[in-house]
């Protein structure tokens, strides 16, 4: 079946309006350029989005847009107020001409199912001139279990200005290179060190945060990026109840066997709990303690190496099944994972097949997305391996 892939890389202009505190961003612009352009105009303005500078706006803004500011301001899609999209008939639509349901669908439902999104209008947010960051590292062999268990309880309930994610990596220590799991508590606080320390000492003294662990800087400098090129397999999960201590120990033991698997645990709560699960297609709001990203990376191109790492990612994901969401097992669209379901290689999208991954990404919102798709693209012109299906297209074939 013939198909077309559109490269939006060079559609990357950014226009910041300081008076409105908004920005029009083309879909090919990467996050790093967006952040830098905003900061160069006004360093007290920002946009809540991800921490990987090379990610493009088109994918980030049409899927969700997690980041360090989400507990304070919500996701990227919660701060997107307009868009320009080419529909299946070649019309260029914006908020004034786009149907309400279509605008709802493209902010979290994956824009590529509905048209070609040319650009987005972002509502910028005010941040403090001084931002405090820290990274407290603890090795599992130093008995980090109680500290991490407390993190599960407290991270979603902390002050909205404070975001602490927990990152798990396998590292080598000592003369003989013993492999252990290291947990990094990586924090960003919208305020000074002097404000942060009493807040942490009151709510999370187990972390043992000291002034020497903290650095103050502007918001733009508090973002970070790891430019090392790698191959990777990503997956995601949602956790609604704290994972027991013994399960944490078993989890870390299994990580050492895989060597290269790492995890990011991003706390929810705050603004994330205040937004209705149906306001956008992204449904994972209240009731989630945190979201887990599994990230297995490697540099070798050898097929056997790829197979080994991908298989371990799947094994670890299965191990976590008793401790994560179920009925359905939820997943984040930004970390697209064909293991949870995909269309036939011909991309003949069928509703029953699409529901296997759609229910995980969108829960109850999947059926509304199908209705929007049926209305705006009935013949399924815009499709890919995990696209939203059209009811009429399935009838026609």
Image: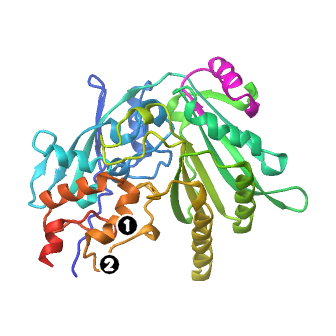
Question: Residue 275: horizontal and vertical position, in percent?
Answer: 37, 35
Dividing the picture into quadrants, the one containing residue 345 is bottom left
Is 100 a magenta residue? no
Residue 294 vs 309, above or below: the answer is: above
Residue lying at 47% horizontally and 58% vertically, measured from the top left: 329
Residue 374 vs 137, above or below: the answer is: below
Residue lying at 9% horizontally and 43% vertically, measured from the top left: 97
Q: Which residues are magenta?
A: 187-208
**To which residue does mark 2 refer?**
344
Question: Residue 156: horizontal and vertical position, in percent?
Answer: 56, 35
Residue lying at 70% horizontally and 58% vertically, measured from the top left: 251
Q: Which scheme is used to colour this image of the protein?
A: rainbow
The outermost residue toward the front is: 327
Q: Is residue 16 visible?
A: no
**To which residue does mark 1 refer?**
356
- Horizontal placement of 359 versus 159: left or right? left
Q: In this rendered view, identify the residue nearer to me: 169 or 298.
A: 169
Lower position in the chain sequence, tag 1 or tag 2: 2
Is 202 a magenta residue? yes
Q: Secondary structure at mark 1?
A: helix
Q: Which quadrant does the N terminus fall into?
A: bottom left
Q: Is residue 64 visible?
A: yes
Question: Residue 296: horizontal and vertical position, in percent?
Answer: 60, 64
Residue 218 vs 303, above or below: the answer is: above
Dividing the picture into quadrants, the one containing residue 272 is top left
Q: In this rendered view, identify the residue nearer to me: 288 or 74.
A: 288
Q: For the residues carrying marks 1 and 2, which lies nearer the camera in this image?
A: 1
Q: Secondary structure at mark 2?
A: loop
Do the CB atoms of the residues marked 1 and 2 lie less than 8 Å apart?
Answer: no
> Between marks 1 and 2, how big is the CA–CA gap?
13 Å
Dividing the picture into quadrants, the one containing residue 177 is bottom right
Question: Residue 209: horizontal and vertical position, in percent?
Answer: 73, 30
């Amino acid at each position: 079946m013939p198909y077309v892939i559109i490269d939006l890389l060079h559609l990357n202009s950014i226009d910041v309006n300081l008076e409105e505190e908004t920005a029009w961003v083309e879909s090919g612009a990467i996050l790093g350029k967006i952040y830098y352009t905003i900061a160069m105009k006004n360093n007290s303005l920002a946009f809540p989005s991800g921490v990987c500078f090379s990610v493009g706006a088109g994918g980030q803004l049409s899927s969700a847009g997690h980041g360090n500011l989400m507990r304070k301001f919500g996701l990227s899609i919660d701060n997107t107020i307009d868009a320009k999209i080419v529909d299946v008939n070649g019309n260029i639509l914006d908020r004034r001409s786009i149907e309400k349901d279509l605008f709802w669908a493209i902010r979290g439902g994956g824009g590529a199912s509905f048209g070609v999104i040319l650009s987005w209008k972002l509502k910028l947010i005010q941040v403090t001139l001084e931002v405090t960051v820290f990274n407290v590292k603890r090795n599992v062999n130093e008995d980090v279990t109680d500290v991490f268990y407390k993190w599960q309880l407290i991270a979603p309930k902390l002050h909205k200005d404070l975001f602490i994610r927990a990152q798990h990596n396998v590292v080598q220590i000592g003369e003989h290179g013993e492999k252990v799991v290291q947990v990094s508590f990586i924090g960003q606080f919208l305020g000074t060190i002097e404000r942060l320390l009493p807040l942490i000492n009151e709510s999370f003294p187990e972390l043992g945060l000291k002034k020497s662990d903290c650095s103050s800087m502007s918001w733009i400098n508090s973002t970070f990026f790891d430019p090392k090129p790698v191959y990777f397999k990503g997956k995601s999960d949602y956790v609604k109840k704290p994972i027991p201590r013994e399960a944490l120990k078993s989890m870390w033991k299994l990580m050492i066997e895989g060597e290269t698997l790492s995890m990011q645990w991003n706390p929810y709560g705050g603004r994330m709990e205040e937004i209705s699960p149906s306001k956008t297609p992204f449904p994972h709001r209240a009731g989630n303690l945190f979201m887990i990203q599994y990230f297995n990376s490697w540099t070798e191109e050898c097929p056997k190496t790829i197979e080994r790492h991908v298989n371990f990612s799947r094994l670890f994901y299965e191990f976590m099944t008793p401790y994560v969401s179920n009925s359905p097992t939820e997943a984040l669209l930004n970390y697209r994972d064909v293991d949870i379901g995909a269309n036939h290689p011909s991309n003949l999208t069928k509703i029953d097949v699409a529901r296997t991954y759609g229910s995980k990404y969108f829960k109850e919102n999947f059926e509304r997305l199908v209705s929007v798709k049926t209305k705006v693209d009935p013949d399924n012109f815009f499709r890919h391996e995990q696209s939203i299906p059209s009811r009429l297209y399935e009838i026609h074939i």
